[in-house]
Structure formats: structure tokens, C-alpha cells
Amino acid sequence: FTLNFSKGASQIIGQYYQLIRLGFEGYKLIMENCRANARYLTQILEKTGRFKILSKDMGVPVVAFSLKDKSLGHDEYEISDHLRKFGWVVPAYTMAPDAQNVLLLRVVVRE
């Protein structure tokens, strides 16, 4: 028996264990490192001149970006497929119904 939309507690228990093991400062260092890596990736993507960064540098370490120039014959889906061949899972998708014309790639930076 489960309630609709309910989930197991295993992920919460796992996070609680990690918090006890690492402590607040340990978790803080990990997140600061992830955010620094996200900022570095953002800088590298901007430096190429081919990508527009859509994410903000705050909160979770996520980098969302799209191609600046679609006339080169490539799109975000093609980039996602090509990266997957090398073991990188970088999803490409369109936004919600009111912004379906926006196609982007997303990288979630993890430890």
C-alpha cells in the first residue's frame, strides 16, 4: 500500500547519513567545489563564442546553454547525441509550452 505521489525514504536516509559523515562544513565544501566547476564550464563555453548561457550562477550547480548560431548546420540534439558517444549524458530538450522555441542543453555538475 502506498499513497499517490509518495516515494520511499531511502534517499532521505542516504542524505542524512552523508550529512552525519561529512558534517555541514564537508557538505558546504562539496557544493562550493561543484559550483566552482559549473562556473569554470560556463567560462569555457562562453570563451568558444558558440554558446549562449541560459542558466544563472546561483543555487544549484547547473549549466544550461544553447547554440548562438543555428545556421552552421548543427543543433543541440546533434551535440547531445555526439557527446553520448563519449559517455557524456548531456540532455537536449525544449522548454515548457510557452517557450517551446527555446532548445537547450543542460549539465548538472556533481561530485
Image (tube, rainbow, N blue to C red):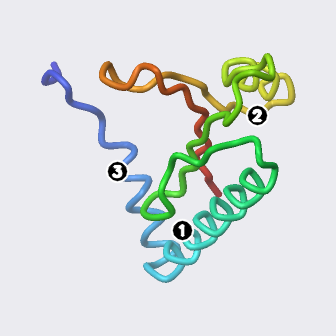
| Residue at x-position 46% and y-position 57% | 60
Residue at point 58% right, 70% down? 30
Left/right of residue 70 with respect to residue 57 in the rendered view: right
Disc 1, SS: helix
Lower sequence index among marks 2 and 3: 3
Residue flagged by tag 3: what amino acid is it? Answer: Ile
Along the line of sight, which residue is nearer the eye, 63 or 43?
Answer: 43
Q: Which image quadrant for residue 95?
A: top left
Q: Residue 35, located in which quarter of the rendered image?
A: bottom right
Classify residue 82 as left or right of residue 12.
right
**Within-10-Å neighbours for mark 1: few <14, some 14–19, many 20+:** some
> How many angstroms separate mark 3 from mark 1 (CA)?
18 Å
Label 3 sits on a secondary structure element that is: helix
At which x and y percent is residue 66?
A: 62, 35
Which residue has dot 1 on it? 31
Eye-nearest disc, 2 or 3:
2
- Asked whether disc 3 touches disc 1, contact meaning CB atoms under 8 Å apart, the reply is no
Q: Is residue 7 above or below residue 19?
A: above
Which residue is denoted by mark 2 in the rendering?
A: 88
Q: Are marks 2 and 1 in contact (CB under 8 Å)?
A: no
**Which quarter of the rendering shows the C terminus?**
bottom right
Question: x%, y% of residue 76?
Answer: 67, 24
Look at the numbered disc 2 and give the secondary structure of its residue.
loop
The kind of residue on which mark 1 rests is: Met
In this orientation, which residue lies closer to the viewer: 25 or 11? 25
Per the rendering, the mark at residue 12 is 3
Nearest to the observer: residue 63 or residue 73: 73
